[in-house]
Image (cartoon, grey):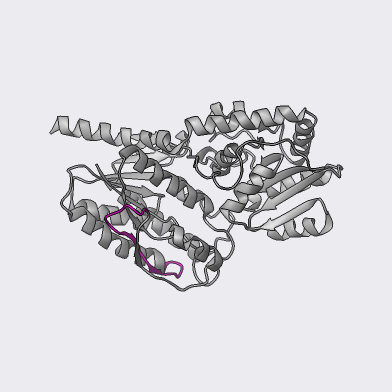
């Protein structure tokens, strides 16, 4: 099986440059999940796959410092005998989507026409119209190609923290119309939650669920995996992620102010629409420490050092059915206990390894934090340990991506029988 992965991940040698040129929210979660999928596929296949890539960054000048992103060849592994492609584009809102579609399709068609095995698969990351268009052009060049679409988010629930003007909504509607036509060329789907099939017309096409993947190598070289007893006088609560009000960050700030305990600290990392409110609280309450937007490695380090991780996103809003918060897996891998709300998009098996908020709103969060820290410290570390063991054994790259390959292989076997 030959696989081409079509996505928007950050090449390892460009990560710092992309961070420095970005303004506001950076697509850390999407980047991590894509790399985990690539690594998992290569472990299962025991060979490298081809990457055709166009980085996910915001538009110039508001969200990125460069108006033109240059194309380049690169290798994501030292042992490759081929080059991957990073496809450039004119980074202006609206224009870059069209530019991407035509540029990326050129490389996909070249790959489609290469002499190779009968089984050729394009795996697309995200419901991205230019990428689906490019895969469609490749399929027309080689009808034997299987297109598998990974759907981490539904288009109607993307960009929840941004103001949407008339032009944005108009272009979004046109984009969705074109995407729905292009989805006819997709052969199989991968969803983050089972509820996504309510919004995507899969008909009789195969689909599977992959809520996320943990990178079991991410802690190596940073610190010992063993969670040592807290020798610090503070009990440290940490939130890492986007500071969008829809994700409950304001409830977290209000909850912490209700906790009149000088031994507590609230650490916050991230950027977004609530950044001003976070900065204001950090300036008035010495217990609150705002780190700004940090690198993934720094976030992982802080997650390991903290005593409690928190995700204040509640179950209000239909979108919670269609999303699995990626930070949940990252939190669990850290070995630090985590407090979350029960969300419909999170499978029940996870709740044996997490603290959950009893109730809703700031008072419920504050009460839950009090209850957690009233327990013996060994109870917390034991839950964190079991949580980490669960995701390492059940949500590692090989195990999670095998579900994708198994689905595709079974489809190909069925097609051969029909032929």
- Magenta residues? 77-94
Counting from the top left corner in percent of width and height, residue 314 is at 64, 40
Counting from the top left corner in percent of width and height, residue 320 is at 56, 40
Residue 385 higher or lower than 110, as above or below: above
Find out whether residue 201 is within the magenta segment: no
Q: Is residue 242 left or right of residue 74?
A: right
Q: Is residue 238 left or right of residue 319?
A: right
Q: Which secondary structure dominates the residues rendered in magenta?
A: loop
Residue 345 visible at all: yes
Q: Nearer the viewer, residue 161 or 44?
A: 44
Q: Residue at x 54, y 63 (%)?
A: 19
Q: Residue at x 73, y 35 (%)?
A: 229
Find out whether residue 78 is within the magenta segment: yes
Residue 241 visible at all: no
Q: Nearer the viewer, residue 114 or 169?
A: 114
Q: Residue at x 46, y 67 (%)?
A: 93
Residue 349 higher or lower than 268, as above or below: above
Q: Residue at x 74, y 59 (%)?
A: 279
Q: Nearer the viewer, residue 91 or 262?
A: 262
């Amino acid at each position: 099986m030959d696989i081409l992965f079509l996505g928007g991940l950050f090449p390892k040698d460009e990560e710092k440059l992309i961070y420095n040129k970005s303004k506001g929210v950076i697509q850390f979660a999407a980047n991590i999940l894509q790399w985990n999928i690539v690594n998992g596929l290569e472990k299962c296949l025991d060979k490298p796959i081809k990457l055709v890539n166009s980085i996910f960054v915001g538009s110039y000048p508001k969200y990125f410092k460069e108006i033109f992103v240059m194309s380049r060849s690169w290798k994501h592994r030292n042992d490759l005998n081929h080059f991957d492609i990073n496809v450039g584009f004119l980074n202006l809102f609206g224009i870059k989507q069209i530019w991407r579609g035509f540029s990326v399709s050129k490389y996909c068609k070249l790959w489609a026409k290469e002499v190779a095995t009968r089984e050729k698969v394009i795996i697309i990351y995200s419901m991205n119209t230019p990428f689906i268009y490019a895969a469609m052009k490749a399929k027309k060049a080689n009808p034997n190609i299987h297109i598998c679409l990974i759907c981490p988010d539904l288009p109607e629930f993307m960009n929840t923290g941004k103001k949407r003007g008339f032009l944005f909504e108009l272009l979004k509607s046109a984009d969705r119309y074109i995407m729905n036509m292009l989805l006819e060329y997709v052969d199989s789907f991968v969803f983050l939650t089972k509820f996504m099939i309510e919004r995507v017309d899969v008909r009789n096409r195969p689909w599977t669920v992959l809520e996320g993947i943990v990178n079991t190598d991410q802690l190596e070289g940073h610190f010992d995996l063993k969670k040592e007893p807290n020798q610090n006088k503070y009990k440290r609560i940490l939130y890492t992620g986007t500071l969008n009000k829809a994700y409950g960050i304001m409830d977290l700030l209000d909850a912490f102010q209700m906790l009149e305990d000088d031994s507590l600290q609230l650490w916050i990392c991230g950027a977004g629409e609530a950044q001003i409110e976070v900065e204001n609280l950090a300036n008035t309450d010495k217990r609150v420490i705002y780190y700004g937007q940090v690198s993934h490695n720094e976030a992982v380090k802080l997650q390991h050092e903290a005593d409690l991780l928190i995700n204040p996103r509640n179950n209000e809003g239909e979108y919670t059915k269609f999303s699995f918060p990626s930070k949940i897996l990252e939190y669990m891998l850290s070995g630090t206990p985590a407090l979350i709300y029960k969300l419909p998009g999170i499978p029940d098996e996870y709740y044996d390894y997490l603290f959950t908020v009893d109730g809703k709103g700031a008072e419920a969060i504050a009460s839950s934090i009090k209850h957690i820290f009233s327990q013996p410290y060994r109870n917390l570390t034991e839950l964190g340990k079991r949580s980490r063991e669960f995701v390492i054994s059940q949500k590692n790259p090989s195990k999670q991506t095998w579900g994708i390959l198994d689905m595709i292989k079974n489809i190909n076997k069925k097609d051969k029988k029909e032929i």
